């Protein structure tokens, strides 16, 4: 657990914080109360290793993270550390040894993040009392350890953590669907498609044999779908396991903790570009317009440029995000959107286009409220934007190993970015049958979105799933254009090509 003796704020910083907060509010930023804590370098690393929360469940992952951070030294705003927690109130941490100009930059940046947490739709379902909830998780896991021993609980947490990506971040906006059927309701038995006919015509229009065959087919179909379990393919694999695996109470509790924390972090992954872009936009605006003493300008420029530097072939969410917000603001100020603008002729008409609408500020606030990264890039990263900012698609030259431009085609550049952002490059996996072969086996399917799954990953996932499901587990995936089925039965992993005679799961995912 991180030690938490905090260092008091110097008065000049306290005054700067108040001014920045009021200035941010005057621009319309709207955040929860934000508590800044001052720590030394060592404390900063400790808190960061725990993801910014003073209390987490005991696990070796935090120690690993601490070592990683210590080696890496700094992350975030170039050479400045930033850490801010989505909670009401928000918590943020400042490193004591930073010069005042850096502290002001971080404070401005943090207020914008807090505004984003509070107002962006994708965060609306997150637990705003996560500080308490994390402490509660810590207490629960400690109780399980007391009863079942550290090693047993840790091994179980390892299994749960290896599957923590298997949730459905979009499902928080949907009504919860049961994964099992209710008992069959005979009154809803499907009717035949019987045509209206006069009595004497009836046997010609609706021949009895055809009706019987159709009835039989419909019955069979209804029977199959009545038995289908889950009712429909489900991406929230963890929920499916919680509801249907035979787990001891303490095991289910650990799994539900890992799932809940995964859902808490999911929106941060889905909005990294926007959230950093928004925070950079505002720290930059607040600093350059209001809070730089002339002596601080050089330091600021130096540190800020560290934030938005992007080497060729690199990916800097701060840079891409802030440039996009600025571009949206400029376009909506000038009215550069809509059918008229898109249809403008090529003779420099677009470059001169300025209707003086002044809608830029309003538009960027709307975007920060409604979008996530995939929608943001897809909609606002226009061809003109890509050309103006000289974004290229880079690849390594197979002969020299050097980076080189492989494409300047805006469509391809946008595509490769979207690829990277969709589910953060993680595979989409669905439970498609919880009673495969009628033997209680678990069948998952990988939805192919252009990238093959790694075979090693598939096997490891199955082994961990087996520890939860306790029956053979299968994962279907397309590898090199061939449909494969990977299986693990508790002893052996095997793989086979799916053929016509391979038994089908309850649902199909292509
Ligand atoms: Zn940030």
Image (cartoon, helix red, strand yellow):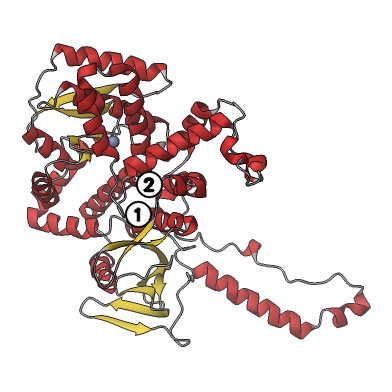
Find disc 1 in the rendering and name its residue: 424
User: Which quarter of the rendered image does ligand 1 occupy?
Assistant: top left
Q: Is residue 126 visible?
A: no
Where 447 sits versus 22, above or below? below
Where 31 sits versus 175, above or below? above
**Label 1: element kind:** helix
Residue at image position (22%, 34%) is 83
In-image side of 140 versus 503 (left or right): left
Find disc 2 in the rendering and name its residue: 270
Q: Is residue 43 visible?
A: yes
Is ligand 1 within 8 Å of the beta carbon of the residue shown at mark 2?
no
Residue at image position (60%, 42%) is 348
**Depth check, front residue: 184 or 254:** 254
Q: Where residue 212 appears, x then y in whole percent? A: 71, 81
Residue 100: quarter of image: top left
Q: Which callout, 2 or 1, points at the residue further toward the start of the chain?
A: 2
Q: Disc 2 and disc 1: Cα gap in Å?
A: 7 Å
Residue 190: quarter of image: bottom right
Mark 1 and mark 2 in contact (Cβ < 8 Å)? yes
Where 62 sits versus 478, above or below? above
Q: Where residue 195 appears, x then y in whole percent? A: 83, 71
**Depth check, front residue: 150 or 199:** 150
Q: Where residue 135 appears, x then y in whole percent? A: 19, 36
Residue at image position (53%, 73%) is 224
């Amino acid at each position: 657990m991180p030690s938490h003796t905090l260092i008091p704020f110097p008065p000049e910083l306290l005054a700067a914080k108040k001014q920045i907060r009021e200035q941010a509010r005057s621009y319309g930023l709207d955040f929860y109360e934000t508590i800044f804590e001052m720590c030394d370098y060592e404390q900063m690393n400790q808190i960061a290793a725990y993801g910014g929360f003073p209390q987490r469940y005991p696990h070796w992952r935090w120690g690993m993270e601490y070592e990683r951070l210590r080696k890496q030294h700094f992350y975030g705003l170039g050479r400045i550390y930033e850490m801010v927690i989505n909670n009401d109130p928000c918590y943020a941490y400042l490193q004591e040894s930073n010069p005042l100009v850096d502290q002001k930059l971080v404070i401005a940046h943090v207020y914008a993040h807090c505004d984003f947490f509070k107002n962006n739709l994708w965060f609306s379902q997150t637990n705003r009392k996560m500080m308490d909830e994390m402490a509660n998780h810590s207490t629960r896991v400690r109780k399980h350890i007391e009863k079942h021993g550290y090693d047993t609980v840790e091994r179980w947490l390892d299994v749960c953590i290896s599957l923590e990506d298997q949730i459905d971040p979009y499902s928080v906006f949907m009504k919860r669907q049961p994964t099992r059927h209710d008992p069959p309701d005979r009154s809803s038995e499907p009717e035949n498609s019987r045509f209206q006919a006069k009595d004497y015509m009836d046997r010609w229009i609706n021949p009895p044999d055809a009706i019987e065959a159709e009835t039989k087919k419909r019955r069979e179909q209804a029977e199959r779908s009545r038995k289908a379990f889950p009712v429909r393919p489900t991406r929230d694999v963890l929920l499916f396991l919680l509801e249907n695996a035979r787990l001891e109470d303490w095991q289910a509790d650990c799994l539900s903790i890992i799932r809940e924390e995964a859902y808490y972090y999911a929106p941060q992954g889905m909005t990294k570009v926007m959230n950093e872009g928004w925070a950079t936009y505002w720290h930059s605006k607040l600093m350059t317009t209001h809070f730089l003493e002339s002596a601080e300008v050089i330091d600021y420029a130096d540190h800020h440029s560290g934030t938005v530097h992007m080497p060729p072939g690199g990916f800097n969410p701060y840079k891409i995000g802030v440039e996009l917000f600025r571009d949206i603001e400029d376009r909506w100020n000038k009215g550069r959107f809509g059918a008229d603008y898109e249809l403008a002729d090529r003779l420099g008409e677009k470059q001169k286009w300025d209707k003086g609408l002044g809608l830029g500020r309003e538009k960027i606030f709307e975007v920060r409220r409604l979008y996530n990264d995939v929608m943001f890039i897809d909609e606002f990263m226009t061809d003109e934007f890509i050309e103006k900012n000289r974004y290229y698609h880079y690849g390594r030259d197979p002969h020299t190993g050097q980076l080189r431009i492989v494409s300047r085609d805006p469509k391809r550049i946008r595509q490769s970015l979207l690829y990277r952002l969709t589910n953060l490059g993680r595979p989409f996996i669905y439970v498609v049958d919880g009673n495969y072969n009628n033997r209680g086996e678990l069948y998952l399917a990988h939805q192919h979105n252009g990238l093959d799954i790694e075979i090693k990953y598939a096997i490891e996932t199955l082994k961990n799933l087996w520890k939860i499901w306790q029956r053979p587990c299968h994962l279907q995936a397309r590898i090199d254009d061939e449909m494969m089925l990977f299986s693990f039965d508790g002893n052996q992993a095997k793989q086979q090509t799916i053929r016509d005679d391979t038994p089908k799961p309850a649902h199909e995912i292509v």
